[in-house]
Image: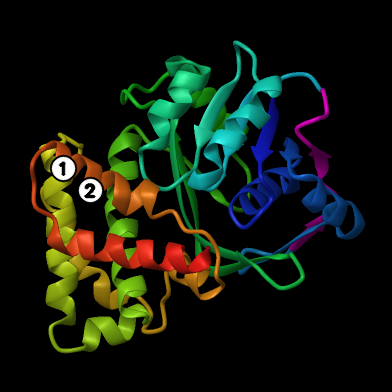
Amino acid sequence: MRILVLGAGGIGGYFGGRLAEAGKHVTFLVRPKRKSYLERNGLAIHSEKGDYHFNPQLITKDDRVEPFDIVLLSSKSYHLEHAIEDLKPFIDHNTLIIPLLNGVAHVPKLQSAFGKNKIMGGYCIIETTLDSTGEIVQTSQFDKLFFGELDGTESNRAKYIEQAFSGTKAEFILNRNVEQGMWHKYLMITVLSGVTTLMHAPIGPIRDSEGGTEFIKSLYNEAATIMRKHNAPISDQIVSKYMQSLNQLSYHFKTSMQRDMEKGLNIETDHLQGYLLELAAHYNLEAPLLTCVYQNHNVYKEMLQ
């Protein structure tokens, strides 16, 4: 099975690297600058699961090779339109695409571009970053990639992919409820990125401040209310579950959006908080806390210009 990974950053580089480490046929679709770096230095992963350094198989959007069987799409949402165009030459009628973006707004866009039957559900739970030298550093023990059919069926092709992804140091998990998992992660990412960027602080000081936990819970409830109105498949207990796990987060835990803002980088607020606010407006729901979070991000983006 020929696997194409779009991107060789913290997400694509990590999971693609673990597949390559296990002897899978993996190619990375990267930009020319990243290709030049990786040709000189190789791809390095530093992890509690074991370090790995190798010379990856690389292509750019201008190369022409045979279409691939599986695509792992780890693009940022604000690069999605370019990613779709870059992928088109490498897709045929047999190719399956597993997107790993946060949120859910990308799914109909991918289905429109490639066909509904080609898009599976996917998301990952992992903390990685690129260090100053361009190497991948896993910053926690979690490295789970979930995938499955969006309609909840356990298809033969999903089982085939499960077998193809087996035997690696990362966890590739076939999930019958992958759509629910995507929405649950969307809820968590939206709230935690919202509060940490709004307060300009790690989760610990926010959680431990007077009224901090109540603020986080209120934002969770506000976001969950919008999702339920949209008939998203979130569980009745998901807010309680996330609030119970809040104390398990490290005092110094920062979200990736928070780190991006500290570095002066683009952020995915339109794809995350912005999309939820679009749903809220559609259903005539008030969302004052989420609106405040989103306005904070809009000010940040204005200052980047």
Image coordinates for residue 195, horizontal then vertical, percent: 29, 71
Residue 39 in sight: yes
| Kind of element beneath mark 2 | helix
In the drawing, does residue 240 fall left or right of residue 168? Answer: left
Percent of width and height locating residue 189 = 34, 58
**In the rendering, at what x and y percent does residue 227 appear?**
18, 43
Looking at the image, residue 292 sits to the left or right of residue 133; the answer is: left
Q: Is residue 240 visible?
A: no
**Image: magenta residue range:** 52-64
Number of callouts: 2
Q: Quadrant of the N terminus?
A: top right
Point 73% across, 40% down: residue: 28
Reply above or below: 227 against 176.
below
Residue 277: image tag: 2
Asked whether 237 falls inside the magenta stretch, the response is no
Crowdedness of circle 2 by 10 Å Cα count: few (<14), some, many (20+)?
Answer: many
Q: CA distance from mark 2 to mark 1?
A: 6 Å
Using residue 185 as the reference point, say whether residue 119 is left or right of it: right
Q: Nearer the viewer, residue 102 or 155?
A: 102
Relative vertical location of residue 141 with respect to residue 270 in this rendering, above or below: below
Residue wearing tag 1: 281
Label 1: which secondary element? helix
Magenta stretch: residue 55 in it? yes
- Amino acid type, residue under disc 2 in the picture: Leu
Answer yes or no: do the residues labelled 2 and 1 have beta carbons within 8 Å? yes
